Amino acid sequence: MAGAEVFLSKRVQEMILNGEKPPAPYICRDGDSIQEVSAPLSPVPIIDLSLLSSSTPYAKQEELQKLRSALSSWGCFQAIGHGIPTTFLDKIRQVTREYFEQPMDEKKKQAKGVEEFEGYGADPTPEEGQFLDWSDRLFLDVYPKDQRKPQFWPERPESFRGLIEEYSFKIKTVTEITSKAMAKSLKLEENCFLNQFGNQSQYQARFNYYAHCQRPDLVLGLKPHSDGTGYTIVLQDEEGLQVLKDEQWFTVPKISEAVLVLMGDQMEIMTNGIFKSPVHRVVTSAEKERFSVVVFYAPELNKEIGPENGLINEECPRLFKNMKDYANIHWEYYQKGQRALHTAKG
Ligand code: OGA
Ligand code: NI
């Protein structure tokens, strides 16, 4: 797909600055589906994580029940009461915006190779016939710490590194609380998922810039996909992310104090299919640009994961095999525009 490579070495932001219309490799929609862009406002469930620790047993049980129900139907929830102050979330939103607003030359100091993952740019070239995402991003390995590649960590804005550091640490705490809560909601030992993720579990951060587009009806900021992670935490500043449920796209509303917790395929495997890894996508807007910070949380490298024994019984037979480095298989299929979960079946 020689055409796509040419575009992948160029940033969407550059095309916008030049006033260019979306070129062919980005056109993935037929332009007749404007309706979808204003998908119904969603009742994506909201879970107050603070109720899971410090409240009365009754309130706690009720919230755990809500959590389980949210993840079995939607596969995601808006987390509030997670302990990260909204003022801090706003700082992360702000510094992300400032990063992308810098001149192109500044960002190109973190430029990635077209076929590489880390750094500033776009995803590696997809398989022939696949469309390109209308977005630019900065992708960084965050934990384990020894996997960080400092050359990709921006020195400007000056506060950026420190804030990423602080944000990742706080998100790590949120994942610990969430993993335990998910286990309890399924009446499992509270550390079971944390054990599956392992001591060297992986956190990768992706800072996304979804440029506005003259023709939002023709492109997508991010193509429909499910995540290959254990699960994913999304911080957004504007609406644009949509989750597929009952064959309908639902927009994830903007709630300034919330982060979205979204199941990836590996949580679907570990819960033996009880929690769903939802298909989601990002639509673009004609007027507004959008920024998001996404943290991908996945089991440590080479670690075998599989359905929790406590979730397998006569009524609920084992649905998935044990898998190792599922993210790699997921990526191969992702590049073909396909899901990979079926490879774990059986
Ligand atoms: C992703 C993703 C959503 C967003 O990066 O996998 O789904 O809002 N991102 O950026
Ligand atoms: Ni995703």
Image: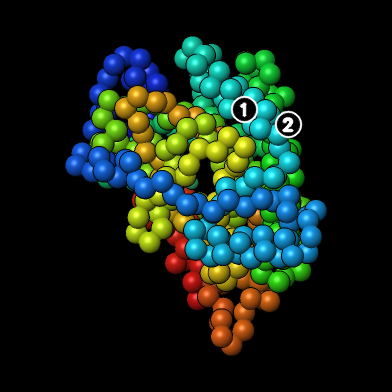
Q: Which mark is residue 278?
A: none
| Tag 2: amino acid | Glu
Identify the residue at image location x=45%, y=29%: 290
Residue 115: % across, % down: 45, 36
Residue at label 2?
166
Residue 90: % across, % down: 62, 27
In which quadrant is the N terminus drawn? top left
SS at circle 1: helix
Residue at label 1?
90
Instruction: Return the disc, 2 or 1, that comes first in the chain's sequence.
Output: 1
| Tag 1: amino acid | Asp
SS at circle 2: helix
Residue 44: % across, % down: 50, 51
Local crowd size for mark 1, using a 10 Å CA cut-off: few (<14), some (14–19), many (≥20): some
Q: What is the distance, in whole Å, between disc 2 and disc 1 at their CAs?
A: 13 Å
Total count of labels: 2
The answer to whether 16 is drawn above or below residue 285 in the figure is above
Ligand 1 within 8 Å, label 2 CB: no
Identify the residue at image location x=36%, y=34%: 284
Local crowd size for mark 2, using a 10 Å CA cut-off: few (<14), some (14–19), many (≥20): some
Q: Is residue 151 visible?
A: no
Which of these two is toward me, 25 or 225?
A: 225
Q: How is the image coloured?
A: rainbow
Which of these two is toward me, 168 or 216?
A: 216
Which of these two is toward me, 155 or 29?
A: 29
